[in-house]
Amino acid sequence: MKQSRFILFVLSFLVMSVGNVYAQNVTVTGTVLDSTGEPVIGANVKVAGKSSIGTITDFEGNFSLSVPADTKKLEISYIGMLSQEAVIKPGTPVKVILKEDTEELDEVVVIGYGTVKKRDLTGSMTSIKQADIIAVPTTNALESLQGKVAGLDMTKSSGQTGSGLSFSIRGNRSLNASNAPLIIVDGVPYGTDIDINPNVIESMEILKDASSTAIYGSRGANGVILITTKKGAVGKTKVSYNGYYSINSVAAYPDRMNLSEWADFKREAYRTDGQWGGPEDDAKIFGSAYDAVKSNQNVDWVDMLMQTGSQMSHSVNISNGTEKTTFNLAFEYMSEDGLVKMDDMDRYNATLSLSHKLTDNLKLNANVVYTYLDQNIRRDPFNRSIYYAPYGDVYNEDGSINVLPFNDGQTISPIAEEVPGAYKNNRLTSHLVGNVGATWNIIKDLTLTSTFGFDKKDIRTGHFADTYTLDGAGNYSLADATNHSDVNWSWENTLAYSFTLGKHNLSLMAGNALYKNVAEEYKGAGHNLISSTMLFYNLGGLQDSQQISSSYVQTTMASFFGRINYKFNEKYLMTVTLRQDGSSVLAKDHQWGGLPICGFGLAYE
């Protein structure tokens, strides 16, 4: 009887508690409209200060939300509109009128060969500002786009320092050709390895659809990323510093067997085969590993390779300007040590932006970015270390690295490259990018712009591996060196005119461009270097398998393009883009083959 009364008491208490919880909630209803009285569909409605309690408006702009009884305010927000708080009055529906965020909509963003207000865009575009670019320390500024751009898929090619990025916008468009987007820095086409100081990047605009990318023709088929660097401003001299130091470590790595687990696994395998019946058979099945197993000489080869990586950057920015001349000058030193020894990088970067008003209607400008990169690259040792047995004589008696730790005369140690002078893989990169141009306001609303751009990149790669390294494989030493040079020239001219007549606003742009690329490469390689001290600096010392090769490729392209932007009554927008390219890589008499590339976009505000 007592037990029954206790159970009844507990059930009654729970029912009362549940009823009390529901009694503490009230339902709030309301409507969210814009400044014209139209319903706002999908507006976020939440309890002020409690982001976990919320809902969104339906197709009529209405919402219904269960909130705690003591709730005083709701917070309503929507993209492109100013957030607003609404006071809750018992028994009275909430009515909220959201206003446009004119500052955001009037923000000027960069598009192909020009700028436009964000409210006047008809194509799909995402703009990333400097605060987001420098928020996370990276060696490649494009990594800051990760998670911020819808449709962007980005991965690192490897875990090495300074490794390149593989990325696509809105999926792959080709099975065999590159799917990387076109990257343009201050109007100059750039490679995928962005070695620019992130602190000098003012903004990055990502153009995604045909309406926005058609102005770049076939080169923009995979999307376009426009990078704009900082410019000087009128005022007092401003000096700023940005620096950081960070450490890196492996978040997770596959578990490996220790020596005891490996030995038990091998015993079980031989027991199943009838070759192991007890400890007396250990010597037979382990062979040269018997002493190591007996003394539990455990070696974790992955741990032998790993180290804590680090990254450091120091950047100084100086800007100044008068009514006629402005400039922005920046210097950066960046250093990175990888997760394994002999994997490191040093980068030196200088950026200059200069603008001078020659007359009231003629302005000259220049932008220059120079980068020098010194990178040591370690051969990937993990594909060996992950399956090596967890034992071995790692070091000799004198403390030096034992390149044959298993005493079998053929299995090379995963850390053999760390023997002084046994291995070197060094890459030196010198990259100079810039442009000079002029902008002439011929008459009111008619502007002629001419820009000459250049991109010169020189890469020297030298590689040496002694006989007893993973590359040499115990057979021979090898050395090779490559000198590669890329020179790109561009000359672009655009004429832009815009006017407004009543409710009609029309902007016209027409232009042409000439491009030239010259790529040269010289390479030498061979086996059995006379002396390992020569590394890759004296390929004449190679005794066997000498190979010499070179190449030269020159391509040119000419383009004509135009764009029409039309706006009616500040609400209806239309964009029409046309471009035709001619390329030297196509067959003679077919270099202008194919239809022009056309982009079309409509929008309603």
Image (cartoon, rainbow, N blue to C red):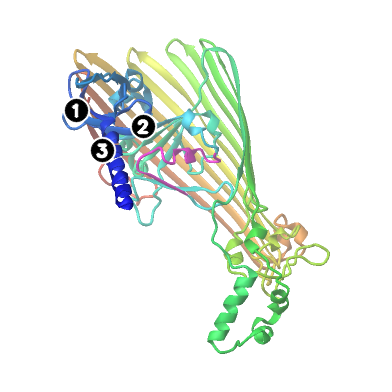
Q: Left or right? Give the position of 304 relative to 86.
A: right
- Name the residue that disc number 1 marks: 61
Is residue 142 magenta-colored? Answer: yes
Query: Element under label 1?
Result: loop
Residue 336: x percent and y percent? 63, 43
Q: Do callouts 2 and 3 mark residues in contact (Cβ within 8 Å)? A: no
Q: Is residue 439 visible?
A: yes
Is residue 364 magenta-colored? Answer: no
Amino acid at the residue labelled 1: Gly
Q: Do callouts 2 and 1 mark residues in contact (Cβ within 8 Å)? A: no
First in residue order: circle 1 vs circle 3: 1
Amino acid at the residue labelled 2: Ser
User: Given this view, does label 2 or label 1 mark the residue nearer the observer?
Assistant: 2
Q: Which residues are magenta?
A: 138-155
Residue at (60% x, 73% y) in the render: 262
- Distance (Cα) linking label 1 and label 3: 38 Å
Q: Quadrant of residue 195?
A: top right
- Name the residue that disc number 3 marks: 598
Q: Residue furthest bottom?
A: 274
Picture disc at residue 205: none
User: Given this view, does label 1 or label 3 mark the residue nearer the observer?
Assistant: 1
Picture disc at residue 51: 2
Residue 340: x percent and y percent? 64, 53
Q: Quadrant of residue 290?
A: bottom right
